[in-house]
Image (cartoon, rainbow, N blue to C red):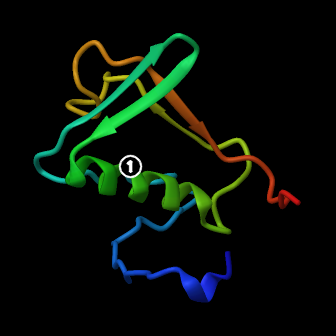
Amino acid sequence: MDENDVATVQVTLDVPRYAAERGLARLWPDTYFLAVRVSDGHVTIEGDPAGLRGLAVQLLSLAQDETPPGYAHDLDGELPAELEPNSTPLVVLRTRGAARA
């Protein structure tokens, strides 16, 4: 499929910039739903629109060129309200910038 055949929508998000002295700020919407579950070897990330956008902000913050390899977001429910109760902890880890062929 050619990229010109795909309808797209432009989305604008505020993504925290990495700073060596403090790392990455973790910005989340005021109210949202986000849960992580593992069942039969499959990981399911379930969220309402606000929760999925919040997760997108976390992923985009890790994807910045300034964010060093090895930096991680541990989504384990320990920070207030990051994940729904009884969610499976999720670690999102920034690795080096190698492209996948």
**Residue 58 against residue 10 in the figure, above or below:** above
47 relative position to 98: left or right: left
x and y percentages locating residue 80 in the rendered image: 21, 30
Residue under circle 1? 55
Picture quarter with the N terminus: bottom right
Query: Residue 5, relative to residue 79: is it above or below?
Result: below
> For mark 1, does the 10 Å Cα neighbourhood hold few (<14), some (14 to 19), or many (20 or more) residues?
many
Residue appearing at x 50%, y 53% in the figure:
59
The residue sitting at 59% across, 89% down in the picture is 4
Position of residue 30 relative to residue 47, above or below, is: below
* Quarter-of-image position of residue 65: bottom right
The residue lying at 41 percent from left, 56 percent from top is 56
Residue at 33% from the left image edge and 18% from the top image edge: 87
On the image, the x and y values in percent for residue 54 come to 31, 53
Helix, strand or loop status at disc 1: helix
Rendered-image quadrant of the C terminus: bottom right
Across and down, in percent, residue 18 comes to 53, 62
Count of marks overlaid on the render = 1
Left or right: 68 in relation to 37:
right
